């Protein structure tokens, strides 16, 4: 089976070798061709439209703007054969997912939203958690592919937006976990408790889960290399706030954490792992930024 792949960032570079090893033929396009170097048995394509000539297409574009430019504005969907299945693995806004549903229905393309929990190192092991929503028959068809990439597929509904909003909410919670680790460790350190000892305590007892453990160790070691970039995490917090607003909801904690992420990005930390947010707990900007909403 030939799979088309659009948008080959760090996650794509981790995923594509797994597909090739599983016997899939992969044809890929990326706006920066250099990202495709060294991927081995991959057919490199010249346009996004050419990718949609395949029966199954995976896209992992960075954000809403990239999806608009590459998939909608370019007319790429028009190249797809009837019954083509498009798996969107990006984290996108609910509003854009609604536009994509309309465009896919008009083109006769089946749309599945399948964002993931997991960093590239996890992806390279085929251990992602895949959040899937869309037509059940389409998910059934691509489940063998998901089994290659993930340790579990979480089916969240028939509407692609349902997986989209679950991923946004989950990422919002991770940013709040990082902030909680930062504030708690700063508090305990001020009373003479070792940061390493405190982080080990809470991540082996109260919060014994991968996110607390991974980002807690980043705080202990003071190492903040991606991982997942702070700028992308801020994008997801803003998506959460906007999605809540569309339903008449407020997210007060997300607003506070988002404002602190804004400060960190303004300090030039946007390309660091999003756990670099923890460094602001030791900064005087905390009091100034805590009450300003994320824009």
Image (cartoon, rainbow, N blue to C red):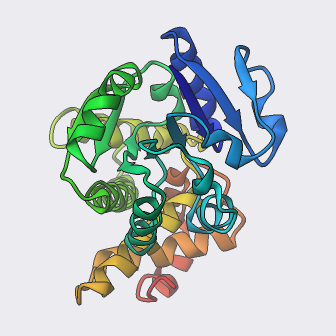
Observer-nearest residue: 221 or 295? Answer: 295
Residue in the image at 72% along x and 39% along y: 29
Q: Residue furthest left?
A: 206
Residue 9 at least partly seen:
no
Q: Residue furthest front?
A: 82
Instruction: Residue at 56%, 59% (x, y): give it.
Output: 232
Location of residue 259 with respect to 68 vertically, above or below: below
Residue 145 horizontal side relative to residue 170, left or right: right
- Residue in the foreground of this view, choosing between 150 and 205: 150
Relative to 142, residue 61 above or below: below
- Estimate the x, y position of residue 180 in percent, counting from the top left: 32, 59
Q: Where is residue 129, by image quadrant? A: top left
Image coords of residue 84 (percent x, y) = 46, 41
Q: Quadrant of residue 194?
A: top left
Is residue 285 depicted above or below 62 in this figure?
below
Above or below: residue 270 compared with residue 262: above
Number of numbered labels in the structure image: 0
At 57% from the left and 34% from the top, the residue drawn is 54
Residue 236 lies, in percent from the top left, at: 45, 64
Q: Position of residue 167 (x, y in %)?
A: 34, 54
Identity of the residue drawn at 61% across and 39% down: 53
Residue 104 vs residue 214, the one in the foreground: 104
Q: 25 left or right of 210? A: right
Kindly tell me whether residue 211 is visible in this rendering. yes
């Amino acid at each position: 089976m030939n799979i088309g792949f659009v948008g080959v960032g760090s996650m794509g570079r981790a995923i594509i070798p797994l597909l090739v090893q599983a016997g899939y033929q992969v044809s890929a396009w990326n706006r920066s061709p250099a990202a495709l170097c060294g991927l081995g048995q991959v057919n490199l394509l010249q346009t996004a439209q050419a990718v949609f000539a395949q029966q199954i297409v995976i896209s992992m574009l960075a954000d809403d703007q990239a999806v608009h430019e590459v998939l909608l504005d370019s007319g790429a969907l028009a190249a797809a054969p009837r019954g083509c299945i498009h798996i969107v693995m990006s984290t996108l806004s609910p509003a854009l997912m609604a536009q994509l549903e309309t465009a896919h229905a008009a083109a006769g393309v089946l749309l599945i939203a399948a964002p993931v929990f997991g960093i590239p190192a996890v992806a390279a092991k085929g251990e992602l958690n895949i959040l899937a929503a869309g037509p059940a028959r389409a998910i059934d068809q691509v489940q063998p592919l998901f089994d290659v990439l993930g340790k579990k597929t979480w089916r969240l509904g028939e509407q692609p937006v349902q997986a989209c909003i679950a991923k946004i909410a989950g990422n919002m919670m991770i940013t709040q976990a990082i902030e909680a680790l930062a504030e708690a460790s700063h508090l305990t350190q001020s009373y003479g408790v070792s940061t390493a000892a405190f982080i080990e305590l809470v991540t082996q007892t109260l919060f014994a889960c991968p996110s607390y453990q991974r980002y807690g160790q980043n705080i202990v070691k003071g190492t903040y290399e991606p991982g997942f970039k702070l700028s992308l995490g801020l994008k997801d917090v803003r998506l959460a706030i906007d999605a809540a607003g569309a339903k008449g909801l407020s997210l007060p904690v997300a607003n506070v954490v988002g404002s602190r992420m804004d400060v960190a990005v303004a300090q030039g930390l946007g390309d660091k792992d999003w756990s670099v947010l923890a460094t602001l707990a030791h900064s005087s900007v905390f009091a100034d930024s805590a009450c300003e909403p994320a824009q």
